[in-house]
Amino acid sequence: MRGMIGYCGLDYERCDAYLATIHDDQALREKTAKLWSELNQAPILPEHINCEGCRGNGAKTVFCESLCAIRKCAMEKGLSTCGGCPNFDACSTMQAFVSQNPTVLENLK
Ligand code: SF4
Ligand code: SF4
């Protein structure tokens, strides 16, 4: 299993919020905030774009910290990722997520 993946299997080394944070790249924060504001129809500001990955102890976006149902569920089950979940094949949340992000299956092996 890859090291820098979220509970869902997303590779956060490719996430603009993660990249903006570790490189302290203000231009990327501003670009990402604008894009995420449009995608989520919510007032996301550059100062909200700080994340060191959803499985670590460091900074997280509001979505990762408080809103993501996958992260919350896996943490409650004491799992390091959904890849270790006995309910994985029957989980409608992850089925829907995988249909949108098929590469996560490889990352969760
Ligand atoms: S916060 Fe949720 S969607 Fe984002 S990487 Fe973590 S588990 Fe995946
Ligand atoms: S039930 Fe679904 S979201 Fe929860 S840990 Fe298992 S696979 Fe992940």
Image (tube, rainbow, N blue to C red):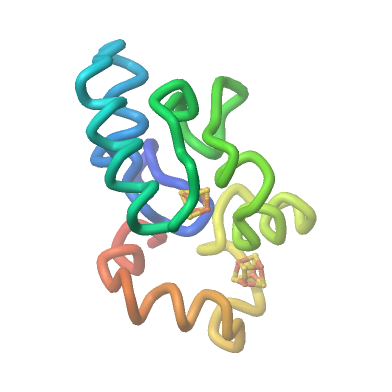
Q: Is residue 27 above or below residue 106?
A: above
Nearest to the observer: residue 108 or residue 102: 102
| Residue ranking furthest to the top | 24
Tell me the residue at 68%/45% (across/down): 66
Indicate the quadrant where residue 69 lies: bottom right
Q: Residue at left 60%, top 55%?
A: 68
Q: Quadrant of residue 72?
A: bottom right
Report the image quarter containing ligand 2. Answer: bottom right
Question: Which of 47/12 is in front?
Answer: 47
Q: Residue at x 36, y 19 (%)?
A: 21
Task: Please report the residue visible at 60 percent of the width from the left and 88 percent of the height from the top.
Answer: 90
Residue 101 pos. (x, y %): 31, 69
For the C terminus, the quadrant is: bottom left
Instruction: Give x and y (percent) for residue 43.
Output: 48, 42
Percent position (x, y) of residue 76? 79, 54
Question: Is 103 displayed left or right of 108 in the figure?
Answer: left
* Image quarter of residue 99: bottom left
Residue 34 horizontal side relative to residue 5, left or right: left
The answer to whether 69 is drawn above or below residue 26 in the figure is below
Task: Examine the rendered structure and indicate whether residue 52 appears above or below residue 105.
Answer: above
The residue lying furthest to the right in this view is 76
User: Is 87 on the left-hand or right-hand side of 106?
Assistant: right
Q: Position of residue 79 (x, y in %)?
A: 67, 53
How many marks do you count on the picture? Answer: 0
